[in-house]
Image (spheres, grey):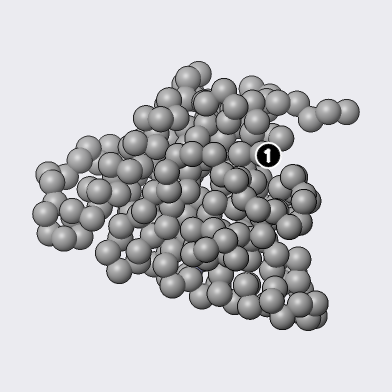
Amino acid sequence: MAAPAQVPDWMRPQGLPEHRMPSAQALQRLQAGNVRHRQQRAGNAPPPGDATPAGYPFAVVLGCLEPGAVGEHLFAEKPGAIEVVRNAGPSLGTDAMAAVEYAALVQNVGVVLVLAHQGCGVLAAAAAARAAGDLPLPGLLGPWVPLAAAGTRLGDPAVGHVRALRWALRRADSLLGLTRSGRLKIAAGVLDPVTGAIEFLPDEPDEVEDDSTSTRVNVVTYGS
Ligand SMILES: [Zn+2]
């Protein structure tokens, strides 16, 4: 049986507006929020914004678990407006994918931001482990390595990695209805943890050289 394109209505939060924030507006709001955050860090803070909690999130950010790698504060938003999923890399294993699907299909967020950061030790370790070849690793680290190393051979490791994950999310069957119609944007960026500035990659198609040839995210091999 083919998977349905939508979740049943009873899965949605009560009172959720029918229309999600337009995806272009959601992305612009993330970018503007990061500018505000940098101004606040530099001591040029604009007057405090509305502190009323947001009714629903409009964005989900997938970032790395390392200290300072990501956080709601980077977007200077009202509480509840941004959701953050953190894991090592980040990688896009099944739990991370389900979290993105939950945000996009149940909560109707308008944008998913895949965020790496400069100086990421996780990406360096994953890339080194992949280069070392078939070495045995404990637990789930073995299958995790290709996910966290995805794209790291494509120029700058952090940029290549977020491009590989963005590419994978844009091709995910579960999100195709939203991404192809433009109702959901998959964005990518790299954080400078020293300044708090996020460099958003241009919103353009990814042409990721893929030596694994898989096109399905949940088969756990994508990008190179
Ligand atoms: Zn990291």
Task: Find the residue positioned furthest to the top.
Answer: 18
Relative to 203, 102 lies left or right: right
Is residue 178 among the parts visible in the rendering? yes
Is residue 96 among the parts visible in the rendering? no
Q: Nearer the viewer, residue 31 or 40?
A: 31
- The correct choice, above or below, for 90 with respect to 121 in the image is above
**Badge 1 local density, few (<14 within 10 Å), some, or many (20+)?**
some
Q: Secondary structure at mark 1?
A: loop
State the image coordinates of residue 144 (x, y, percent, origin top left): 70, 66
Task: Find the residue positioned furthest to the right.
Answer: 1
| Quadrant showing the N terminus | top right
- Ligand 1 closer than 8 Å to label 1 CB: no
In the image, what residue occupies the spot 56% across and 74% down? 124
Provide the residue designation for mark 1: 172
- The correct choice, above or below, for 206 with respect to 146 in the image is above
- The correct choice, above or below, for 212 with respect to 55 in the image is below
State the image coordinates of residue 54 (x, y, percent, origin top left): 36, 35
| Quadrant showing the C terminus | bottom right
Relative to 117, 168 lies left or right: right
Q: Nearer the viewer, residue 88 or 8?
A: 88
State the image coordinates of residue 210 (x, y, percent, origin top left): 70, 54
Q: Nearer the viewer, residue 95 or 172?
A: 172
State the image coordinates of residue 105 (x, y, percent, origin top left): 60, 32
Q: Amino acid at mark 1?
A: Ala
In the image, what residue occupies the spot 48% across and 43% down? 187
In the image, what residue occupies the spot 39% across and 37% down? 27
Relative to 157, 202 lies left or right: left
Q: Nearer the viewer, residue 168 or 55?
A: 168
In the image, what residue occupies the spot 49% across and 58% down? 159
